[in-house]
Amino acid sequence: MATRGKNIQLFLMDGEATGRMKCTLANWTGIAYKIPRTELDKCKERDDLKQSGVYFLFGTSDETGKGVVYIGQAGVRKNGEGILNRLQEHKRNPDKDYWTEAIAFTTSNNSFGPTEISYLENRFCNLAIEANRYEVKNNNDPTPGNITEEKESEMEEFIDYAKVIMGTLGHKLFEPISKPIQKKQDDIPVNVEDTIKLRLERTIKNVGKVEASGYQTSEGFVVLQGSHISKIDDNTIPATIKERRKNVVEDALVNADGVLQEDMLFTSPSYAAMFVIGKSENGLTRWKTEDGRTLKSLEESNDA
């Protein structure tokens, strides 16, 4: 069955792409807001931001340069202030000065109660941790609460829509980096992970044999966990790759034997190859299938 398209309505509240955004989906009661930290005070008159909901605080780690996120819930209090009040509290909190923008989810019919937002907060946290795109700043694992199977089904449907909205608003928080490109036959997606998996092998002086595996995604190229990374490099590789090789050692993402401990995404096959080998390399010709076809030949055959 062909994948259906989705009609997303994106409203630029300030008339520009860098300002506040309101996002809705056809046939969905949810509402999402993307709010820059500097524009939070402009939201004081938004009644739907005074409802219950779940919010995300996004920023970048000064130490690692990796994206960070804090996921929280906001219930309606006696003063009537819900999400907006919690965001304002976080803005005043010096321990949360890392965030630069917030994304908040609520509903058009104000239907979220304590059970719903607890469940959503728990699921969103776990999904973000599993995807490993961002450093999740929550110190404690949120409780899912007690929820009926009917309500759980309803909340899972909300989560499916929220994933689409989150990616549309610029954060692939819930998408694993190792999601392979899917080809289509007669407009039907076909999972081709096994057929597009690529390998890199090279023997390097004073290092020995280096072996890695990976594949292309819509964002670039992923080097897979378990790949063997050269322990030495030279000045033929870009400074950004040299720095990244240094960081994975410092962050223990490569063990003492040079084995990568998690999937890593790069913007190009060549950057991925240089990260593995530690030397200048053409990724289009270095990455190959099991039967020896290069990535370059695969792309040329796909274009034919």
Image (cartoon, helix red, strand yellow):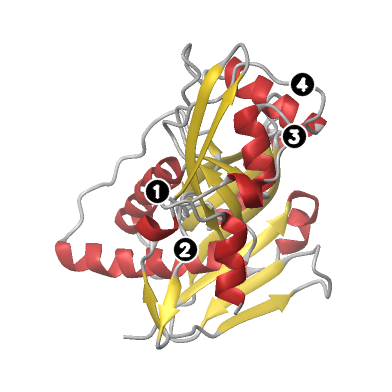
Can you tell which mark lies on residue 280?
3
Q: Name the residue under label 1.
A: 127
Question: Whole-Å distance between the Cαs marked 1 and 4?
Answer: 38 Å
Q: Is mark 4 on a helix, strand or loop?
A: loop
Residue 10: image x %, image y %? Answer: 66, 78
Vertical arrangement, residue 18 with respect to residue 215, above or below: below
Q: Using the image as rendered, state which of residue 283 and residue 72 is in the foreground.
A: 283
Is residue 258 visible to us here? yes
- The answer to whether marks 1 and 4 mark residues whose Cβ atoms lie closer than 8 Å is no
Q: What element carries label 2?
A: helix
* Quadrant in which the N terminus appears: bottom left
- The answer to whether marks 2 and 1 mark residues whose Cβ atoms lie closer than 8 Å is yes
Residue 83: image x %, image y %? Answer: 55, 55
Q: Nearer the viewer, mark 1 or mark 4?
A: 4
Can you tell which mark lies on residue 163?
2
Q: Is mark 1 on a helix, strand or loop?
A: helix
Image check: 68 left or right of 11?
Answer: left
Question: Whole-Å distance between the Cαs marked 4 and 2?
Answer: 41 Å
